[in-house]
Image (cartoon, rainbow, N blue to C red):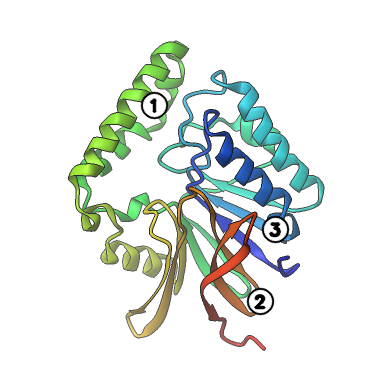
Amino acid sequence: MLDPQSTVFISDIHLSAQDSALQNLFIDFLQGPASFAERIYILGDLFDVWVGKDIQPEFHDKISEIFSQLTAKGIPLYFMVGNRDFLIQSSFLKKANLQKLSDPTLITLHGIPTILTHGDKLCTQDIAYQRYRLVAQNPITRFLFLCLPKSLREKIARKLRLKSKLHQQKQTITILDVVQNAVDDMMNRYGVTQMIHGHVHRPNIHSFDLGKKAAKRLVLGDWHSMVSFIISTPTENCLATYEPSKGIQKIASYALEGAR
């Protein structure tokens, strides 16, 4: 069970209608450990792909109902789009009671100014992806794409996913990971020493120097056979995993300054 003052962060779940095991894991986590959280942040890629509310609406309704059950308990839910679900529409967010966040978003987390981002903006060495992102996430491009016939949107999405997979196979981990200069620039721009993001699927807590200040970068993992999440309490920030058969397992953590 989580501390009642816990803030939970998740990302890169990659839900799809075809993966029932992942759906069950997601539901188990939200109805189990996450149901004791004070608030929950989803930092992108909730869905493996989103190409319109008219595609697999029953599946979307199933997920929105799970979220509604949490908000009915008084747990606020915050959502930031990722590179897989940036086309998600406001009608789904409204139905699921998800409060949309811009990328990046500045919050105060247990007294500590913290920048939240999906993470793909920080992968500046992947020039091909950044060019694609600039075009694909343009509001005009998004509008025109969602106006296309359903079958054409599905076909384009399949081709883009295949192209992305091939691109990632050709790149080194260094190219696909975040760039420290980009991290420093974003944190300096917002005047923070703590960042939380996903996207790169390399869960970790990084400690580094930001100028003359000590800084932390918390990275969320993706979901396969287990949940990857971050628990933030008034006393510590913790990277953890969850499996129904094993419960919550702490991977790494650090105490917050001033914590008792």
Mark 1 residue type: Ile
Element under disc 3: helix
Q: Where does the image place residue 176, in percent across and percent down from the top left?
A: 26, 52
Q: Which residue is mark 3?
A: 33
Q: Residue at x 65, y 23 (%)?
A: 58
Q: Which residue is mark 2?
A: 234
Which comes sooner in the sequence, label 2 or label 3?
3
Number of the front mark, 2 or 1? 2
C-beta proximity under 8 Å, tags 2 and 1: no
Q: Where does the image place residue 95, in percent across and percent down from the top left?
A: 69, 32
Q: CA distance from mark 2 to mark 3?
A: 18 Å
Q: Where does the image place residue 203, in percent across and percent down from the top left?
A: 43, 62
Q: Nearer the viewer, residue 160 or 97?
A: 160
Q: Which mark is residue 140?
A: 1
Element under disc 2: loop
Which comes sooner in the sequence, label 2 or label 1?
1
